[in-house]
Image (tube, rainbow, N blue to C red):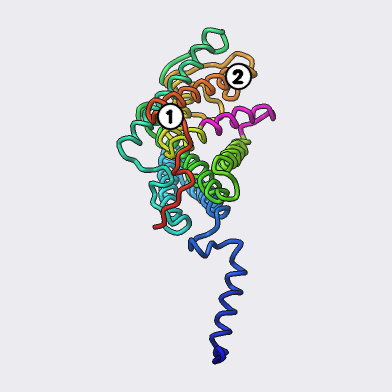
Amino acid sequence: MPEEPTGRRTETTTRQLWRWLTWPVWNGRQRRLRAPLRALLPTVVTFLAFAVVQTAVRGRFAHPIREPLEAVGFAVVLLGAVLVSARALDRRPVSEFGLSLDRSWWRSFAAGAAVATAINAGALLVSLWAGWARVVGVTRGAGDLPFALAMAVVFGYVAVAATWEEFVMRGVLLKNIAEGADGFLPRWGAIGLAVLCSTLVFAVLHGGKVTHASQYGYYLLAGLILAGAYVLTGELALSVGFHVFYNVTQSAVFGLGHSQQTPELLAVDIVGPTVWVGEEGLVFVGFAALGGIALLGYVRWHHGRLALADSVTRWTPR
């Protein structure tokens, strides 16, 4: 039997060594990074990019130019993250992140927005009824801008930030953990692990708002609700709609936000005990839970069942 040429043996050995060295970070069969890196890189890189944009804009511009410029910069970073993740990291169609953006997607987005608006209205009504809040004015806090324009700027800013959170927390992190764990765990176990991880990261990212450890429960519940909407539909429509309008209506419409200083359609003074009112109070926790139940009802009505979506662990190579 003829002996294999030395050059070919060396080339084969080099390739085997390269595959062995890169195995922890590179999936040679799928020709893309492994799931943990695909899950974490967009979150870390975009977070740093947001910090760069914010530092650059705030160092050169003042209110009221600063806020719309930041929102535009954040939107560019978000769009870049979606495209780079789809083409270079995940190597999948953008729609597989849960961003199909068809007519059905927008209907679900509107449903999520309606539920979020309703539960914040309910939280305000309960707070007013209990004497824990009082309305002290309307259309306040616009600063140097006309009120309608100030509200539009706030909506754009909040919409970009909330969409980024849903994209990186659910569309990227949750999905890639579920894909990576599927096969090592039963499918339901892989998705459950991904929901747990994304919910914990979501709560930690909001740690700057927390003044007591018990308040993490509010963000854990919110993370579970948003993750549940994603894994039951395979789309980000419900979670994005809910998240955007929850943040906007809480702060800018009903005046119940403390961590976000925005123009307010209703200016409200919170005078009740913090254990009940405020962003992490029990009133908000209760209404957030009701919102989660309402989203489940919508999914059951819209899809005809409550079941884990096949697309959560699906990968379609580009």
Q: 176 or 203: nearer the eye?
A: 176
Res. 282 mark: 2
Q: Is residue 295 above or below residue 88?
A: above
Q: How would you classify the magenta stretch by its main secondary structure?
A: helix
Q: From where the camera sits, is residue 214 visible?
A: yes
Image x and y of residue 251, in percent: 48, 25
Identify which residue, 158 or 111, lies in the foreground.
111
User: Bounds of the magenta span?
Assistant: 209-225
CA separation in Å, label 1 and label 2: 30 Å
Decide: few, some or many residues near mark 1? Use Cα within 10 Å; few <14, some 14-19, many ≥20: few
Residue depicted at x 64% and y 30%: 216
Q: Is residue 34 left or right of residue 86?
A: right
| Picture layout, residue 20 above or below residue 264 | below
Q: Position of residue 300 (x, y in %)?
A: 42, 26
| Residue pictured at 60% horizontal, 21% vertical | 281
Between 269 and 170, the one lying in front of the other is 170
Residue appearing at x 63%, y 19% in the figure: 274
Q: Mark 1 belongs to which amino acid? A: Arg
Farthest-out residue, left: 103
The spot of residue 75 in percent (x, y) is 41, 45
